[in-house]
Amino acid sequence: MSVKHTLTTCPYCGTGCNFFLQVVDGRVVDVVPCKTDETSRGGLCIKGYNAHAFVNHPDRLLHPMVREANQLTKATWDDALRRISSELNRIASEHGKDSIMILASAKCTNEENYLFQKLARAAIGTNNVDHCARLCHASTVAGLLQSFGSGAMTNTIPEFEDADCVLVTGSNTLEAHPLIGARILQAGDKGAKILVVDPRDTPLSRVATLTLRQESGTDVAWINGMINVIISEGMLDKEFIDTRTTGFEELKEIVKKYTPEKVEEITGIPKEDLVAAAKIYASGERAMIAYAMGITQHSNGTDLVRTLANLAMVTGNVGKESTGVNPLRGQCNVQGACDAGALPNLYPGYQSVEDAETKTMFEKAWGTKLSDKKGMTLTAAFNKALTGDVKAMLIFGENPMMSDPDIGHVEEAISKLEFMAVVDIFPTETAKLADVVLPAACYAEKDGTFTATDRAIRAVRKAVDPPGDARADWKIACDLGKMLGGAGFEFDTPGQVMAEMSAVAPIYGGIDYERIEKEMVRWPCPSKDHPGTKVLHADSFKIGRGVFAPIRHTPPAEETSEEFPFILTTGRNLFHFHTGTMTRRSAKLQREAAGPYVEINEKDARDLGIADDSSVKVSSRRGSITLSARVTPWIRPGTIFIPFHYAEAAANRLTNNALDPVAQIPEFKVCAANVQKG
Amino acid sequence: MLLERVDNPGKLRFDVPYQMAMILTKINRFVKEGKIAIVARRCDEKAIAELVKRDLLDGSRLELIGLACSAEQVEACRCTDPCPSRVDIGQPSEPVKDDQNFAGMLDMSLEDRLDFWINQFRKCNKCFGCTLNCPVCFCDECLLEEKTFAPDKGIPPGLTFHLIRTVHLADKCVECGECERSCPVDIPLLSLRKMVNRDMKKMFNYVSGDPERMSPLLTTLEGDPMEDDPNVC
Ligand code: SF4
Ligand code: SF4
Ligand code: SF4
C-alpha cells in the first residue's frame, strides 16, 4: 500500500496552476489543489480538478505501431524508431532536408521542445520546425516583437488583481483561462472597472462595467477609435510618448479618421459606448489589456496586436505593475515551446536563425553545421505538402486533423506525404493516418518544466510510470537524434536538457531545477543571481523605444454573401480543451458539455424556425457539419459560434485558412457560413 | 503532506490549512486495511465524526493526532470552535467572539441579502471546488451533476446549484471554511454556511460534528436513529 502526493503543473490552459496528483499504489486517482502556489492559491477550475481523469483511460496508446499492408500493427520500439530514421534519411537524400517538417508540441515540456527543434536543426539539418502557436499566438509573437521587442505577456497573472481597469478583448477569460478570469473578478470586487469587447456575450462580459459588441473582424476600427477619443479628450500620457516611443505623429494621422461616428458605422458599437470605454481605460492609473484568440486569429492578426500595443502606449500603460499588453496563451506550454525555439525562424530564446553570429554560436554549442535558411511554418507546411515540396512529417503531440483550419485541405495534404510519424498519448484523428505511431508519456508520467503564459517556469513532476511501453517524448527525441546520427543527444534526465538550454538561451540563463524547486522564476532571467522579471519594459523597451504602428482597418478575408449570410466564429468552452483528446475522455467534463453545438441568436433562430436543441446544418464554402442548436441572447444577431472540441462535428471543416501575411496565422475567427434546419 | 513512514517526515509545516479529513476521504476508497494516523484540527475531527456516524469511515482504524490552530488561523477562519479534543501539536487558541462578515449579513434586509447573493453567485465558475474540497460532501451521485437541477449549458450555473448545496449540507457542515478558501472567485461561502448552521441550531438544537448525536434529518420523529441506510441522502 502506498499513497503519495506529487506536486505538478496543470496540463490544460496557460495559466499554469499547480496541484498535487494523488497517487495510490502507482495509479493517479485524484487531484488536490495546492494552497501555497502563488498562481492558483488553493483553487483550480473544473478542468484542473479533472486533470487525473484521462491518465488511466483505456484508449491510451500502449505500444508502438507501424503501418503494414495499410494496417497499423503492433511493433517493437526498435523497429518503429528504425523505420522512422530510415524513412527520414531516405527522404532527406532523395528530396533534400527541407522536405522534412517537424511539428513540436505546446503540450510537451520545455526540455522536450528544445530537443524537438534540436532534432530538426542539428540531427536532420533543417529549420522546418513549428507548432500550434502558429494557430494561436503567432501574431502576438510577431506583433509585440515589433512594437516592444519581446513577444510575451508584459505583466504577470497576480497583477490583474491590483489593476484599476482591465480591458478584455477576444478572450472568454472565465472559460478559457478560468483562474485569470477569477483574478479579474477580484479586481472588480475591489472596484476596478472591467471593459469587455467581444462579439459574444461571455460570462465575464455579463459582470463587466461596460461591454462593447463589435462585429467580428472590425477590431482595428474600435481600437483606433479609442485612441482617437483619447487624443481628442487630451487624455494622452505625453511624457511617456515623448520619452519612450517613436512614430506617434504617423499614428495620430491615421486615427484621425476613426471618429466615434465612423467607428459605429464599421463596427456597430454605439459611439457613446466607445467614448465611455476610451475614457474609462485612459483614466485608470493602472490599466491592463488582456486578449486572446479573438485578436490573434485573424488574417490581420499581427496588425491587431500592434494596435493594442498602440493603445497601451498612448496612455503610458506599459512597464509598470498592473498595466501592459497581456496575451493569454492557451496551452500549458505554448509559451515554453516558443521560448525553446520550436519556431522556424528562431533558435531557443528568440534568436534569429538568419543572424550569422547567432548561427555560429549554435553551431559551436551543438557541434554541427546548421542551415541559415528560415524554416517553414506549420500552415505553410500543409500547403507545401499539397504541392509536393514537403514529403515527410514527424508530429509530436499535435492533432492538425482537428486543430487546423479547413480540415479537408489538411487531410488531402497528409495523403500526399510519403511518410508521417505521430507521437501521442491517444489515437488522435491524425495518428490514425500515420505510418508510424509512437506511444508517449503524458504530463503525469515525466519530469520537466512548463512555462506559463506569464513567463513563470513551473515544474512538471513524474507521479507515475507511463502505461504499457509508452515513453516520455524527451527520450523518444533523444533516441531519434542518435539514430539519425546527430551529436549531443546523450541526455539522461530532463534536468541536463535544461542545463544545455539555459546555456544557449540567455533569457533562461539563470534557470535550473534546484531553483525551480524553491521559487517561482519568470524569464528574462539571465543569470543564477538574477531574480527573474515580473514587469517587462520597465525602464526601456528591449528595442530602445516602443514603436507605434499606424494601421488601417481592412475587411476580413471572407465576407458574408447571400448564400453564406452568417459570420462564424470558433472558440472554446469551459469544459473542454482544444481537440478534446483529453477532456472528452474525462467523464465529468464530458457530462458538462457532451456534444457539439452552435450558438445562434434568438432572433436569427426564430427567423429560421430553429428551436433550442434541435439539429441544424452549418455550412461554409469549404464544408458542412450537423450539430445541435443552442439558442441564446448572448451572441450578436448575424454571428454564430461553434466550439472546436468536437470531432464528430469539427468546426474546422468550415473555417477559412486565409493567413496573416506576417505571422501566417489562419483566420479562425471570421468565416462566412449558413445555418439551416438539419 | 501525507506520509507513509513516520521515521522520515521530511519538511512539515502546520501553517497551511489543508483539510486532512477531505484528503482522507479521497484515499479511503483505496486503503482497505490497516490503521491510518491523521493530523486533525478541530474541524477535521468534527468532519470525521460526521463520516463515522454515517458508516463512511471506520473510526476504529483511525488514529487522530490533534493539531491546535494558531491564533492567526483562528482569525482567518473566523472560527468559533478551534480546539481539538486532544492537542498533540501547537497551543490552543481562543475562539473568535463575533464574526463581522456574518454579523453584517444578518443586518441586511431580505431583499438586499438576495441581491447580494445573486451578485456573488454570478461570479461562480462551476469549478466544483466547494464540493470537491468539502470534507463532508460525500455523495457518489451528486445532485449538482444532475442536469435537471443544475443545467449543463455553461456558466454561471444558476442559483439552484448553490441552494442545493446550501441545504444539502445543513446537517453535516462543520464550518471548516474549506469551501470559501477554495472558491477562486471569493464567494463568501462560509458566511452562508454559518447562517444555515445557526438555523439548524435554532430549529433542531443540532450542531454538526458531535460524535454522539445523529442528525435530526436522519432520525425518526421520536428521535430514534433510522434503520435505513444513512448513506442515502
Ligand atoms: S485555470 Fe488553467 S491551469 Fe488552472 S486549473 Fe484551470 S485549466 Fe488548469
Ligand atoms: S465549511 Fe464548507 S467545506 Fe467546510 S464542512 Fe462546511 S460546507 Fe463543507
Ligand atoms: S468554489 Fe466558488 S466558483 Fe467554484 S463552484 Fe463553488 S461557488 Fe462556484
Image (cartoon, coloured by chain):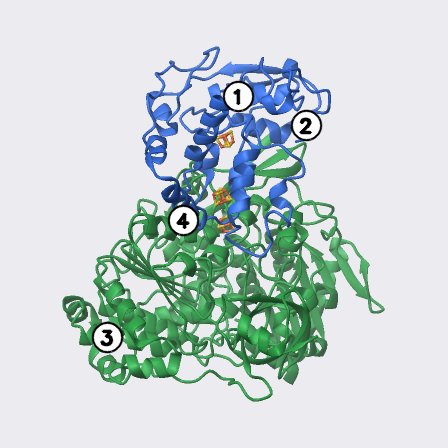
Chain colours: A green, B blue
> What is the x, y in percent for residue A479?
64, 55
In screen coordinates, is B18 left or right of A356? right
Q: Nearer the viewer, residue B119 or A226?
A: B119
Q: Disc number at residue B204?
A: 1
Residue A623 appearing in the image: yes
In screen coordinates, is A211 left or right of B33? left
Work out whether mark 2 precedes mark 4 in sequence or the reverse, and give the earlier one: 4
Asked which quadrant contains residue B25, the reply is top right
Q: Are marks 3 and 4 on the same chain?
A: no
Q: Are marks 3 and 2 on the same chain?
A: no
Q: Disc number at residue B119?
A: 4
Q: Is residue A268 above or below residue A190?
A: below
Q: Which residue does the numbered mark 3 point to in the structure image?
A: A229
Do residues under tags 3 and 4 come within 8 Å of each other at their CB atoms?
Answer: no
Q: Disc number at residue A192?
A: none
Q: Which residue does the numbered mark 2 point to in the structure image?
A: B231
Q: Nearer the viewer, residue A306 or A119?
A: A306
Please tell me which residue is depicted at 47% across the width and 27% down the height of the picture. Answer: B199
User: For the residues carrying marks 3 and 2, which lies nearer the camera in this image?
Assistant: 2
Secondary structure state at the residue bearing disc 3: helix
- Quadrant holding the N terminus of chain A: top right
Work out whether mark 1 precedes mark 2 in sequence or the reverse, and give the earlier one: 1
Residue B5 appearing in the image: no
Type of amino acid at the residue the image marks with label 4: Asn
User: For the residues carrying marks 4 and 1, which lies nearer the camera in this image?
Assistant: 1
Type of amino acid at the residue the image marks with label 1: Phe
